[in-house]
Amino acid sequence: MNTPEHTGTLVIGGGQAGLAVGHELLKCDLPFLVVDANARTGDSWRHRWDSLRLFTPNWANSLPGLQFPGEDWDFPTKDEVADYLESYARHFELPIHHDTRIERLTGDGDRFVATAGDTTFVADNVVVAMAAYQRRKVPSFADELDATIIQLHVADYQNPGQLQDGPVLVAGAGNSGAEIAMELVEHHEVLLSGPSTGAQPFRPDRLSGRILMPFFAKVVLTRVLSKSTPIGRKVLPELLHKGAPLLRVKPRDLERAGVVRVGRTVSTEGGQPMLEDGSHHHVANVVWCTGFDHGMSWLDLPVFGQHGEIDHDRGVVAAQPGLYFVALKFQHSILSDTLLAVGRDAAHVVDTLRQRSRARTLA
């Protein structure tokens, strides 16, 4: 094993959260290193489906210190987001080790030890800057589907060319499921499976969106629906396990396009998916838009609550001094894992980290 690499703060994850944390650490002149499992900054966005566009316009997608390029009310593609993140890392000359996947993080006295293959990192502080979308969630009965059915998780879906002729079941009726269903219905019979998640009352790319979105994004979703307000503390836990309302695609769009809404997929019968009402449908393809787990089993530290969630206060882990998180779902507000709000959470975490580092230096 190689000689351990020492750093003041190890930032795990080189996406928008890790870059925002790196920017804040630079401002404080604190030594740090960012490690990322991808080969290139922005790859987590590049690997998403080809037609993906953000629901937020350019003006809402800037990380601290560098404006997102383009017209304010254009909605960027996933590749444009990836290129912006890469340019952000280059602009601030952030120290990033790519192709470095942390396999275990544990404590050693008042320090942390992270292992990635034959490489070991030792750090005074660790910031886990990874969104809660790391491990694919697919129902256990997926293995019981007929072997001739093509199955893709949304993380692996790229475009309609991956599917074979015949009907498609899109399991999961949130934003990803709705967007993919609209793309596939041009060439397939499409069944969209799952309960309705509701819909935002305006379209982000229409005049109504231009009028209402700035207020909703900057006030309602970022400040009101946050853990700093009574209503936020009441509502956010209730939303944690619910799908987000549809933003761009509306229920009437699905109906007009010919997408067939069906109930939740709960099991199989004869190798075909079975719905909660007992009916089953013969399909040739299934796209699982069934979400993700946080995928942090590599954390060998006492940071998990009784239901497996990270036990923290705005990203600060009281039970494990020196350990912090950024980009957790609803970390502080309903938008904590988005480009719009991740900078604020990063600033709070780094300010807390700075105070701890200063106290250790003076001790």
Image (cartoon, rainbow, N blue to C red):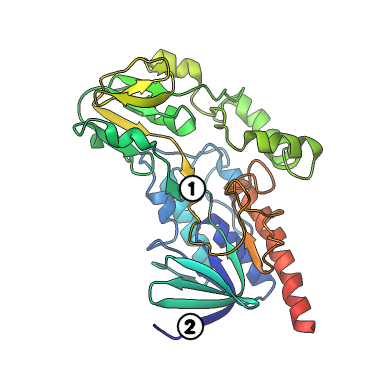
Q: Residues within 10 Å of mark 2 (few under 14, many from 20)?
A: some
- Which amino acid, by three-letter code, is at mark 1? Tyr
| Residue pictured at 44% horizontal, 29% vertical | 172
Q: Tell me which corner region of the image, top left, top right, bottom left or bottom right, holds residue 162.
A: top left
Q: Tell me which corner region of the image, top left, top right, bottom left or bottom right, holds residue 26.
A: bottom right
What residue would you read off at disc 2?
A: 4
Q: Is residue 107 left or right of residue 291?
A: right
Q: Tell me which corner region of the image, top left, top right, bottom left or bottom right, holds residue 22.
A: bottom right
Residue 100 image offset from top left, x and y in percent = 42, 68
Q: Which residue is nearer to you in this view: 95 or 305? A: 305
Outermost residue, front direction?
306
| Residue pictured at 18% horizontal, 32% vertical | 148
Q: Which residue is nearer to you in this view: 345 or 84? A: 345
Q: Which residue is nearer to you in this view: 165 or 63? A: 165
Residue 344 image offset from top left, x and y in percent = 69, 54
Q: Quadrant of the N terminus?
A: bottom left
Q: Which mark is residue 244?
A: none
What residue would you read off at disc 1?
A: 133
- Which amino acid, by three-letter code, is at mark 2? Pro
Instruction: Say if 180 sits above or below 70 in the image.
Output: above
Gap between marks 2 and 1 measured at Cα: 29 Å
* Res. 92 in view: no
Residue 188 image offset from top left, x and y in percent = 27, 22
Residue 234 image offset from top left, x and y in percent = 74, 35
Q: Is residue 8 left or right of residue 299?
A: right
Decide which of tag 2 and tag 1 comes sooner along the chain.
2
